[in-house]
Image (spheres, helix red, strand yellow):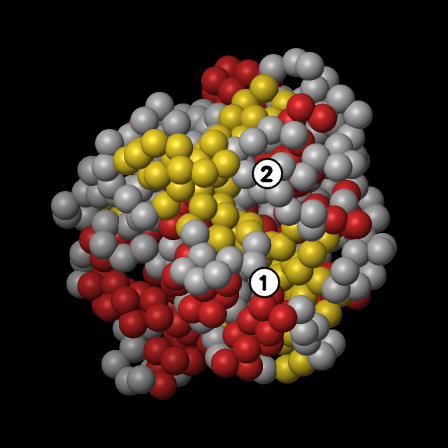
Amino acid sequence: MTTPHVGGRHARTPRLLASLLTLTLLAGCTFAGGDGGAPTPTGTATQDGFSTDGPVTSTSTPDADGAPAGLEDFYGQQLEWTDCESLFECANLEVPVDYEDPGGPTIELAVLRAGASGEPQGSLVVNPGGPGASGVDYAMMAGAVVSREVRAAYDVVGFDPRGVARSAPITCFTDEQMDTFLGTDPSPDDPAEERAVEGELKDFAQACETNAGDLLGHVSTVEAAKDMDVLRAALGEPRLTYLGASYGTFLGTTYATLFPDRVGRLVLDGAIDPTLTGLEMGLGQAAGFERATRAYVENCVGGGSCPLGDDVDTAMVAIPAFLDEVDAHPLPVSGDTVTELTEGWAMLGIIVAMYSQDIWPILTQALGRAQQGDGTLLMFLANSYASRHSDGTYTGNGMQAIYAVNCLDRPADEGPDLDSAAVEEQFEAASPTWGRYLAGDGACEYWPVHAEQTLQDYSAQGAAPIVVIGTTRDPATPYEWAEALADILDSGVLISYDGDGHTAYGRSNDCVDDAVDAYLLEGTVPQDGLRC
C-alpha cells in the first residue's frame, strides 16, 4: 500500500527497508516453499513473457459503451486469446501510458484467463496485492485462489498491472544490486551506517528514473484502476466482478470510486483503509505485526522447546535481541549466493512467517538452527519473502515495482520537519519488535516524480454492494482497516474472521468461504457484520 511517513523529509533516520515492510507484505501471500518465490512458468517464453502453445482460440466481444472521450479505440479493442502455459489462454491489452494523452505512447498489459471448469457465467478478475505481485501468476493458481464452485462458474482472469512482471516491467536495480539493497542494515546505528543507507536509497530512486523513463510517473493505482476498466470492456463485461487481496483491495476501492456504476460483485479481502495518512498506516502496521508476532510466540512457547524462551514475554524480547546479535555477527549461509545472513535478511525471514500459521513451524526450526550458528533456513524464508531464488535470481520485479507504485500513491511528506526522536518513540511504543524498522520513508524520500491524479473521496456512492473482509490478527492489513473501509464505502458490507494470518477467503473457515461463494455465485449479499 503506502510508504509510512510522518513529518518532513528529514524527520527520521533513513530506513532502507521501511517501505518494503509496509508495502511488500501487503501482497496476498502464499508461501512459496521450494527455492522461494512465485511459481515459475514452464515452457518456452515469448517476448511477452508467456509460454505459447497454440493459435488464436477465441476472441472477446468488447463492451465499449460509455468509453471516456478519446479512449474509444482502447475500450473497443478485442482480446486475441492464444493457448499458453499448457492450460490457459493469454492475450495482451493495449492501454495509454498517460490517460490525459490517449494519442501518445501506449504499453501492453499481459492478461491470462483460466477458463471456467463448468458453464461460465462471466469473468472474475483477480489481483493478489503488492503492489507489484503478478495477477497472471495468481490466475494460474485459480484452483487455490477460489473455491471449486467459483472455479466452475467463472473464467478467472488475471493481469499484470502496468510496470509489473510482464507488463512493461520497471526494473531499477540488477539482481546483484537488489541483494545488496535488501541485505543492507535496516536500522542504522551510527552516522556512517546512516550515510550508507541514504546512499542506497538515492541510488535506487535514481536508477528507477534512469531505467523506467516516462512510465515511472504513470504507474499509480488510479491509472491501474483505469486499465482495469479497459480490461472489463475488452472482456465484454458490462460490470466488473472482482476479487482483490491486500493491496488488491485498494485497487478495487479505487476502481469503485472511479466507476461506481460499473461495479458488479466486488470482494475485498485483507482490506486497506484508503484514507489513512502515512503515519497512521505505519503505526497501524507496527501494531498489527506486533500482535501477529505475539500470537506466533504464544504458539511457539505453548508447544514446548521454543528456541526463544519458556515464557511469552521473554520470547518477545528475544526476537529483537537476536536481530541485534545478527547485526553484530552475521550468520553463515550455505547453498546460496548470499553467504551471510545479515540483520536485513534475518528480519525478512522472521516477518514473512507472520503471514500464515502454516509457516510458524518452519520459523521455529529456522530460529533453532540460527542459535546453532546456521542462517541457511532463515535465508530460505527471506528468499520466499523476496521472491528470490538461491542462485541470486528474482522472480518478477515485485520488490522494485512496489516502490514505483507506492511512491506515487503516497509520496513522502514535504511539510515541516517533525521531531525524529518523538516519531521513533511512537513506532517503538506501537511495536517494540518491529517499530524501529517501520519508521521511515524509504526510497520515496528521494522519488523523482509525482502522480498526476489522486483521490480524496472513496465512498463510491451508487456502487452495488461491496464485500469487505478483515482478519482480527492480520499483521499486514490490521482488522481495524477493514472496519474503516466498510464504513467508508457507501455500500460496504463487512465480514470479520477471528483468526491469524493475512487475508481470509480460502484459508480460514467455511463461514467466510460460504458467504463469499454465495455472493459471487448467486449475488446473495452477506449479512453486514457477519462474524466467522
Please name the residue that numbered disc 2 is placed on.
61
State the separation of the CA atoms marked 1 and 2: 30 Å
Question: Which residue shows up at 56% across the image and 59% down it?
Answer: 121
Q: Nearer the viewer, mark 1 or mark 2?
A: 2
| Foreground of the two, 405 or 491 | 491
Name the amino acid, label 2: Thr
Q: Residue furthest left?
A: 335
Please name the residue that numbered disc 1 is placed on.
269
Q: Residues within 10 Å of mark 2 (few under 14, many from 20)?
A: some
| Foreground of the two, 124 or 342 | 124
Residue 195 vertical placement versus 22 (above, below): above
Q: Quadrant of the C terminus?
A: bottom right
Question: Which residue shows up at 65% across the image and 59% down it?
Answer: 266
Q: Secondary structure at mark 1?
A: strand
Residue 359 seen anywhere in this rendered image of the structure:
yes
Residue 104 vertical placement versus 502 (above, below): above
Q: Is tag 1's residue or tag 2's residue first in the polypeptide sequence?
A: 2
Residue 466 vertical placement versus 36 (above, below): below
Question: Which residue shows up at 48% across the image and 61% down it?
Answer: 119
x then y, percent, for residue 200: 46, 28
Name the amino acid, label 1: Asp
Q: Secondary structure at mark 2?
A: loop
| Foreground of the two, 456 or 528 | 528
User: How many numbered callouts?
Assistant: 2
Q: Residues within 10 Å of mark 1 (few under 14, many from 20)?
A: many
